[in-house]
Image (spheres, helix red, strand yellow):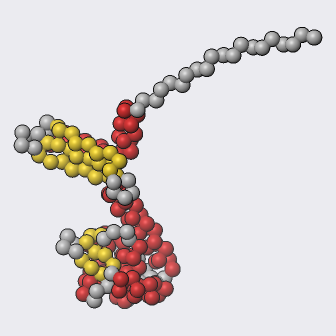
Amino acid sequence: MPQVGFIRSKQEIKFLILYIAERLIAPVPFEVMQELTMCDPAVDFFEFSECLNHLVETGHMTRSRDELYAITEKGVRNGRACAEELPYSVRLTADRLAKEQNERIRRQKQVQSSVAPRSDNTFVALVSFNDDDGRPLWRMELALPDEKQAQDLVKRFQEHPERMYFSLVDLLFPKEPKKEEPEKPEEPADKE
């Protein structure tokens, strides 16, 4: 038995997919598109999957080699023309979820890390903290004796890149203590 929701047809599921895809700042994998579209309980997995594939076949969406989905110009045009067909509450929920996903996408671009083996059986942890345009603010490569230590460093970096960045800045540019200004001697009061 289908769950109660506002989406009633495959056509509305397609409108919802296009509505969401237009609001995303980068292509997303199938699972993310599914999670965002199933914001209405009436959308089921099989209908969603069928609708997404149909949108790719008709040129409204693209699927890249690495299985990322993005909206096309045709999808933007048709999606905008049909957006008002979606219930207002579904649009509000979709807007909120797309905004949250965009924050995750931005964060992934800002905080990057990896672990790579070296020829001497050690590992290197590569971490970088980037600005919104993808330019590195800080990049570090640290050799570690084993993979577990490298993975631990990467995990801590992923959790708190700002803290690590500002700690390094504080270490490199220590704040000088404020110089106390010498007390000015009191001026004698005028005697009349």
Q: Residue furthest right?
A: 192
What number of labels is visible?
0
In the image, 154 versus 124, the foreground residue is 124
* Residue pictured at 35% horizontal, 62% vertical: 105
177 above or below 77?
A: above
Q: Which quadrant of the structure image shows residue 59?
A: bottom left
Residue 150 image offset from top left, x and y in percent = 19, 42
Q: Nearer the viewer, residue 167 or 42?
A: 167
Expressed as whole percent of the image width and height from the top left, the position of residue 109 reads 32, 58
Q: Is residue 47 visible?
A: no
Say which residue appears at 24% left-offset and 77% top-offset. 63
Answer yes or no: is residue 73 visible.
yes
Viewer-side residue, 100 vs 122? 122
Query: Residue 49: where, in percent of width, then height?
Result: 26, 80
Up-down: is 133 above or below 36?
above
Q: Position of residue 74 (x, y in %)?
A: 35, 86
